[in-house]
Structure formats: structure tokens, C-alpha cells
Amino acid sequence: MTDGDKDKRRFLLAATTTVGAVGFGFAVWPFLASLKPSARTQAAGAPVEVDIGKLEDGQRLIVEWRGKPVWIVKRTKQMLADFETLAPKLRDIKSDESIQPDYAKNINRSIKPEYLVVVGICTHLGCSPSYVKTTDTHDLGESWKGGFFCPCHGSFFDLAGHVYSGVPAPTNLVVPPHTYLSDTRIVIGIDPQSGAV
């Protein structure tokens, strides 16, 4: 075999290997692409940035995070003052048995007292409670200070998401990880202490 034949053989071997590798890549790509989560799946777990600048006193904003409703309520000074008077009626006022980040383990269950951020799902069987203000038409009694009522099984929560004693719901509403970017912007899904989702 001459040197020219060896060079030709090496060239053909290299060309065949290259074409085979490219063909293999084209054949495998659709399979690998199918393993990647869809854009909808990725978005379902992603942090959500919310503009709270237009929330008025007593107003609730609902956003979706990880497929769950998250409620953001702008509380008035009176709403905050009512927590102390409600304390004897609440099951877990210190949030010892409930799920919330450490920075929200206080009587307001929040970073900033005027804003409540909770997952809007009852901790009993996963229903979505109604937001009932004192000014709304209701039959919850004259002592009702406003909060959340789950009509499915009769659980009550105050405006910090504390569960009332004697109702089916076992724990307070869940406070998701969240942080403030500014006075008017909040990100749900990021812990301000660790930065983790």
C-alpha cells in the first residue's frame, strides 16, 4: 500500500466518523430535547414578581405561584391592632405549628406589617377560603374582625392567616418565601435570607 493510499484511507475514515457523529447527534437531539421540562413547567416553579404599588387599604391581590393562589393583602392599622384582641380565639398565635419562613414568624406573619402574603389554600382539605372584610355583607357575627372563611368545612383565619381554635383546619395558612425589591415590588418564591427558591 502506497503512502497516497494510506492518506486516502485516513481521510475516508475521518470523513465517515465525522458524518456518523453528526448523524448520531441529529438522531439523539429530539430525544434529549423531549427530556427538558416544558416552558409551562419551568414557569410553574419560577419566582413571581408582583407590583403592589396600587394596592389600597384592605384590598387583596391574587397571583399564581407554583400552581397555587397567593394572596397579598394590604392591611390597615386597625387590622393590625385587632390581632392582639383576637389572640385568645386563635389556635397558633406564635406560629409554632405552622409553615412560614423564620422572618415571618411574628404576630403579623410578615416582613412588613402592612402586607400579608399567604398561600390561599385552607390547611384542612385544600379548599380556597373566601376573603370576608368587616364591611362585607356576612353572617359571621358582630365580633368578626375580617379575615378568611372556608365555607367547605367552616374554618376561619384572621388577617395574618392565623387559624381560629375549634375549626377543622389544623394550622395557620402557609406563608411562602418572598422578598421585597422595593416599596412597590415583591418577589414570591425567593427567600431574602438565603436567596433560595
Image: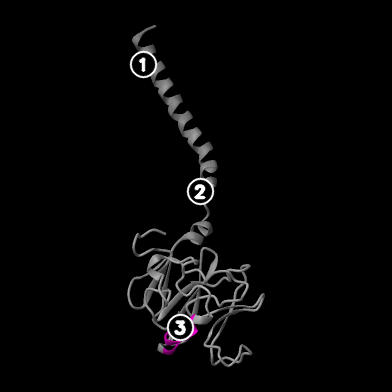
The first of marks 1 and 3 along the sequence is 1
Q: Give the camera-side residue of 73 and 11.
A: 73
Magenta residues span 78-87
Element type where label 1 sits in the image: helix
Element type where label 2 sits in the image: loop
Q: Residue at x 41, y 70 (%)?
A: 105
Q: Are marks 1 and 3 in contact (CB under 8 Å)?
A: no
Q: Which numbered mark, 2 or 3, is in the foreground of this view?
A: 3
Q: Look at the magenta stretch and give its main secondary structure.
A: helix
Residue 144 in the image, given as x and y percentages of width and height:
55, 88
| Colouring convention used in this rendered image of the protein | one colour
Instruction: Identify the residue position indicated by label 1 in the image.
Output: 7
Instruction: Identify the residue position indicated by label 3 in the image.
Output: 83
Residue 86 magenta: yes
Which kind of residue does numbered mark 2 sit on?
Lys
Which kind of residue does numbered mark 3 sit on?
Phe
CA gap between label 2 and label 3 equals 47 Å
Residue 61 in the image, given as x and y percentages of width and height:
49, 79
